[in-house]
Amino acid sequence: MIIQIGGANSLFHELMKNNKVIRFSRSSENYFDINDLNTWNEFEATAKKNNKFCIAVGTLQKKRITDQSREEVVNSFLTNCISIVLLCERIFSINDEARVVIISSESGIKGSYDETYFLSKAAINKYVQERSLGAKQQLVSISPSTIEDSTMTELRDDKERLASYKNNHPKKRFMKMKELANIINFLLANDSLYICNENVNINGGKFARMKNF
């Protein structure tokens, strides 16, 4: 069983094809507000009984950090970084066999128009690399580029820019949610425990610089 915290409906349905999944999010009956740590007691029983977790929490603002209010900066960093770290710490403290995959973003590597989002994801990736774990615990972050059938992509209003990005991509397409789910399934499989404290970049090779002239 996989415990999915946050994330799109499309990811939930893809994971459901090969697993039993319990989802905690704002849009489900199993509501879990990652910003409200008082709800942890309701989640703790599930976290003790199950070992596999997928955390897919994030919020992106369409403005630069200089145009964000103090409250917006704090809430963004809380959602995109601090609350995820606190959640992981609580999971690892009560489950000696907890295996956690965090859906990060390539923005944590290359930057973002929303600098608060970039800094938050960069901090998450560093946390994943440095957090020492038990012998049967696992922590991995996945940093995908644009996911074509994700809600975040579908709601973007810069369609022409997206079309240009796709046309210039070496694969001539964006990533599919099915591909992301397959990677999550692999990382949480029984024989992948040695893949730990790593950030997995998934971009289809768009940053490759050595050309075949």
Image (spheres, helix red, strand yellow):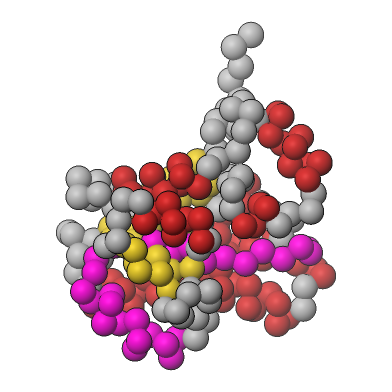
Residue 159 vertical placement versus 9 (above, below): above
Q: In percent of the image, x 64 and y 8: which residue is there?
A: 213
Q: In percent of the image, x 53 and y 74: which residue is there?
A: 27
Residue 174 in the figure: left or right of residue 64: left
- Where does the image place residue 24, in percent across and percent down from the top left? 43, 74
Which residues are the magenta region? 37-64
149 or 37: nearer the eye?
149
Residue 120 falls in which quadrant of the image? bottom right
Q: Is residue 59 magenta?
A: yes
- Where does the image place residue 102, in percent across and percent down from the top left? 43, 59
47 or 110: nearer the eye?
47
Query: Image quadrant for the N terminus?
Result: bottom left
Residue 173 vertical placement versus 4 (above, below): above
Residue 45 in the figure: left or right of residue 37: left
Residue 199 in view, yes or no: no
- Where does the image place residue 41, in percent across and percent down from the top left? 34, 88
Residue 38 falls in which quadrant of the image? bottom left
Q: Is residue 180 magenta?
A: no
Residue 136 in view, yes or no: yes
Residue 170 vertical placement versus 203 (above, below): above
Residue 138 in the figure: left or right of residue 210: left
Q: In percent of the image, x 40 and y 65: which residue is there?
A: 4
Residue 116 vertical placement versus 109 (above, below): below
